[in-house]
Image (cartoon, rainbow, N blue to C red):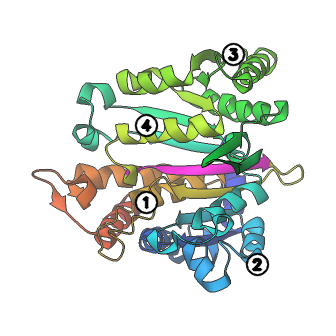
Amino acid sequence: MDDLLDAHVKDAYRMTTHKLFLLPGDGIGAEVMAEATKLINWFNQTGIAAFEIEQGLVGGSAYDAHGEAICDADVALAQSADAVLFGAVGGPKWDGVPYDKRPEAGLLRLRKDLELFANLRPAICYPALADGSSLKREIVEGLDLLIVRELTGGVYFGEPKEITDLGNGQKRAIDTQIYDTYEIERAARVAFDLARTRRNKVSSAEKRNVMKSGVLWNEVVTRVHAEEYPDVELEHVLADNCGMQLVRNPKQYDVIVTDNLFGDVLSDVAAMLTGSLGMLPSASLGAPDEKTGRRKSLYEPVHGSAPDIAGTGKANPIAMIASLAMALRYSLNMGEWADQVEAAIGAVLAQGFRTPDLMDDGMKEVGTSEMGDHILAELAETGAA
């Protein structure tokens, strides 16, 4: 997880061509992806890095073209990429398509086929946006926590998953929560490794009081901690209490590790602490390759496709640009430039520029493309300094 390299390794890496696979998707996905692409092109033009870009279809756009939420050829391109950048999928246009071909199935297939088992969801409150949160400034100002969500197991993938007709107007729906030891171990290791680079604390969230999967989760995380990470502080918290604590006192947390279902819920709670879903990126990582050490990876904004504002120029591109920064950090060994991109975002916000979702009195409203231009200009200025 350490993105620091010796100088000669960094120089060699700058000469490497990084393969990026872009999947803009539906709704505002294409609009926000265009702003991240501006930064990628700037890295290429300045010679800071070399990126080879390919683009594919996912979600509703893929269904319209292929009758599937993602085609085999695009999955293969994702498999071979150094990093996948993903926009957003879905919209009312595709509400009536078969369940296994719905837009979200494309994302689920990518997670499964690329074995992206660890979802990293940071929640960072930029000082300029502390008053935009629904909580008081003192609760969220300076917030910097990270949720590690197990992504390929649990109730979303467990079998049986079905609805059966019982007769007499009654039906039964079944979703199965399943976890094996190794799935919990590898998620825990990612959380502990990341905690060592942060404030050295992990909070493991589950429901061991009512769920057997929670009992196993608690047992495995406790063992991995004792055997491999005794230097990291570990606490266990019931997932429902964790949700309450995120609203009550979120800064008590550093790294939260949890299962697929609870991670989905808790990360959205954490996202709103920062003022807008449009602000937050995410990373989904696989296991490191035994020979190269490279992890398959996918980076995406937390927000959805927002079809109601698609094409209006109102979308906030910051989460997509911050997702690119995460790709620089975790997949491309460009941690210093990830810092620069994140600093540029903070500087532009401090200058008062806001997309409509962040707009407040006294601020300067800008559209999607303008926000991307301001961030790029700030990056170019500080990067040249």
At 80% across and 48% down in the image, what residue appears? 288
Residue most toward the right?
291
The residue shown at (65%, 34%) is 259
Q: Is residue 280 magenta?
A: yes
Where does the image place residue 239, in percent across and percent down from the top left? 55, 25
- Tell which of 88 and 194 is nearer to you: 88
Q: Which mark is residue 269?
A: 4
Residue ranking furthest to the front: 168
Name the mark on residue 238.
none
Nearer to us in this view, 164 or 279: 164
Q: Closest to the observer: 130 or 238?
A: 238
Q: Which mark is residue 383?
A: 1
Three-letter amino acid code at disc 4? Val
Residue interval drawn in magenta = 279-287
Quadrant where the C terminus lies?
Answer: bottom left
Residue 16: give x, y in percent of width and height. 71, 67
Q: Is residue 158 visible?
A: no
Q: Which residue is mark 3?
A: 231
Q: Amino acid at mark 1?
A: Gly
Q: In the rendered image, which residue does mark 2 sit on? A: 73
Mark 2 residue element: helix
Main SS class of the magenta portion in the image: strand
Within 10 Å of disc 2 (Cα), the crowding (few <14, some 14-19, many 20+) is few
In x, y percent, where is residue 384?
A: 41, 63
